[in-house]
Image (cartoon, helix red, strand yellow):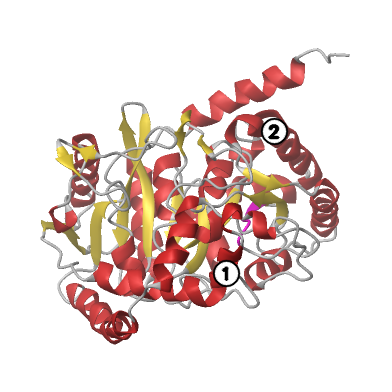
Amino acid sequence: MPEGSPLTWSVADLMSAYASAELSPVEVARDALERIKAVDGELHAFITLDEHGTLAQAEESERRYRDGEARVLEGVPISVKDAFHQRGLATSLGSLHYKDQISEADSGVVARLREAGAVFTGKTNTAEFGQSATTDNLLGPDTANPWDPARTSGGSSGGAAASVGAGMSTLAVGSDGGGSIRIPAAFCGVFGLKPTRGLCSDEGGFQAMTEFVSPGPIAHSAADARPMLEVLADRSYTRQLFRPLSIGYCPRPENRAVHPGVVEVTDEAARLLEGLGHRVEQVDLPLGGWVEVFGPLVLEDESRERAHLLDRPEMLTDYERRSLEAAQHLDPADVERARRDLPAYRQQISDIFLGYDVILTPATAVPAFPLGQRPKTIDGQKVDWLWGAFPFAVPFNVAGTPAASVPAGLVEGLPVGIQLVTPMHTEARLLDIAQSLEELLNFPKEQAFLRWDQASVAVASSPVKS
């Protein structure tokens, strides 16, 4: 069996150990709960635990392995972003307004994972209503980064990414309406994939960024994300034989400021892809126009779903309150124009793929920054507060295309992700090229695991105080 905590093993190794009875899903579930209790006081990745429910799922998985009835994700520990409904537990949506609202049923994403045999480790922290690229809200401390708890995990699926990055869960389910899977995946040194819009349904789920959002997997690797995406999309993504692809590489999309170390890591990824036999060509991507589409349609959503919450503004984060206030002054003509321009923007991005099979960019403009301190300048250039640190994800939410962040290297000891994008409904291609690149990159994910291994052991072995 592999070394280290089973929570850091690949899905294939974990399920193989279950199938051979070398390891029990109950043992691993208990390990997950103990590790969360030991280290999450510093990371704040989890909002809610359900020990009884977690162990009951694990016991069912153990029985199924014994009886030869194992399902696709049988016994695999998976954390659930607190933007998805899990029956019997509160779904806070990162908000004081909903912190005690108990979900009566699973939403579609959770129901599929449950049916596939997942063992849910807990509900993970999120930005309020998913409206920030960092995971901070009024429910408690910000979610911290497993590589350096003084820094952000990103957002809004920051709790999900941190749960995997620190080895508290094998997989996590997040959602991505404006980078909310890829940004925290890049900051936390894990793999995150936003599928084609509409591919993965969440029936009965939370509504926000409805034109742009997709549920998706966060994992240690593309290989681990593959079976989870198959469950969410209800289709197979078997790895295909290698074929050379045409890759359009843009190190500074829209001529935005990027940390030199991030460019260096992305350059190296481009060289590795070229070494694999792909044709890599530097290109100036025509991405302009996404801001004018994204902003009005997101604000319209917020106004429709949550304008009533302005009656209690003290219960809202500053960023959500400002969004709702801005939505009240939204010009209907801007909304109409955005809705009209959305198909044209999607065609604009689709046309890029007439010349390229894959797009390569940095996933973020910087590595993870200190908690509460978004950068004002990057590489000597002033950047805006909202998008400066992470401007490269949203264009592909507006376009509706699948996109992934792949951990590609370290800058000043912090993870850096590269972004791979493919045309709509080509998730198989995206997973294949990400997996082939990961096998060359040899990203040192064990550095974060070992930090929290040591913290977990220290807590477990400390004397009980009376």
Residue 331, percent from left and from top? 33, 79
Q: In the image, is residue 276 above or below residue 324?
A: above
- Mark 1, secondary structure of its residue: helix
Q: CA distance from mark 2 to mark 1?
A: 27 Å
Q: Which mark is residue 35?
A: 2
Identify which amino acid the numbered label 1 is placed on. Leu
Magenta highlight: main SS: strand
Q: Is residue 381 magenta?
A: no
Q: Which residue corresponds to the image point at 61% horizontal and 20% vertical from the top-left?
A: 454
Residue 253, percent from left and from top? 18, 56
Q: Which residues are magenta?
A: 78-83
User: For mark 1, does the 10 Å Cα neighbourhood hold few (<14), some (14 to 19), or many (20 or more) residues?
Assistant: many
Identify which amino acid the numbered label 2 is placed on. Arg
- Residue 153 seen: yes
Q: Are marks 2 and 1 in contact (CB under 8 Å)?
A: no
Location of the N terminus (image quadrant): top right
Among all residues in the image, which is located at the extreme front? 311
Among all residues in the image, which is located at the extreme right? 466
Residue 302, percent from left and from top? 49, 70
Q: Quadrant of residue 457?
A: top right
Left-right relation of 154 to 62: left
Q: Which mark is residue 232?
A: 1
Location of the C terminus (image quadrant): top right
